[in-house]
């Protein structure tokens, strides 16, 4: 019939697990943006819809406070 494809494990949202996001922590915020400075999508970061909106808001705050660049 067909070949067996192993199922990928679903990513668990780190923010649902209790991790806090602070826009002043550039090291932590940089994992949510790519090398060009764009915000990564949910499928790449593994965040849920609710926390993806939080990530977007915190990245935008970090950009306005000059913690993260708008572009690289």
Image (cartoon, rainbow, N blue to C red):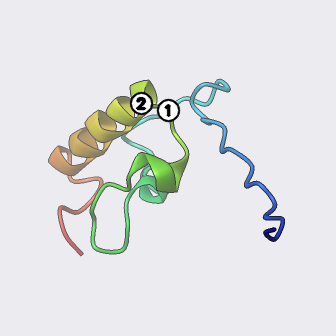
As drawn, the label of residue 65 is: none
In this view of the protein, which residue sits in the foreground, 58 or 1?
A: 1
Q: Position of residue 55 (x, y in %)?
A: 38, 38
| Quarter of the N terminus within the rendering | bottom right
Front-most of 26 and 43? 43
Q: Badge 2: how crowded within 10 Å, few (<14), some, or many (20+)?
A: few
The secondary structure type at the circle numbered 2 is helix
Q: Are marks 1 and 2 in contact (CB under 8 Å)?
A: yes
Q: Residue at x 60, y 35 (%)?
A: 13
The numbered disc on residue 48 is 1
Number of callouts: 2
Q: For this view, does 24 lie left or right of residue 43?
A: left
Dot 1: element: loop
Q: Which residue is mark 2?
A: 49
Displayed quadrant of residue 36: bottom left
Tell me if mark 1 has few (under 14), some (14-19) or many (20+) residues whose alpha carbon lies within 10 angstroms of its own: some
Q: Residue at x 36, y 74 (%)?
A: 35
The image shows residue 24 at horizontal and vertical percentages of 38, 42
Residue 28: percent from left, percent from top: 51, 50
9 on left or right of 39:
right
Pick the front one: 3 or 7: 3
Write the residue at 36% across / 30% down: 54
Image check: 40 left or right of 12?
left
**Where residue 61 sits in the image (x, y, percent)?**
23, 39
Quadrant housing the C terminus: bottom left
Kindly give the residue lying farthest to the front in the view shown.
1
Q: Quadrant of residue 6?
A: bottom right
Q: What distance separates the C-alpha of mark 1 from that of mark 2? A: 4 Å
Asked which quadrant contains residue 68, the reply is: bottom left
Indicate whether 59 appears above or below 49: below
């Amino acid at each position: 019939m067909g070949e067996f494809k192993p199922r990928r494990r679903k990513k668990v949202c780190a923010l649902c697990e209790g991790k806090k996001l602070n826009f002043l922590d550039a090291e932590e915020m940089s994992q949510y943006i790519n090398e060009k400075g764009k915000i990564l999508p949910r499928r790449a970061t593994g965040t849920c819809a609710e926390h993806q909106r939080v990530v977007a808001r915190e990245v935008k705050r970090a950009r306005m406070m000059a913690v993260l660049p708008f572009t690289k």
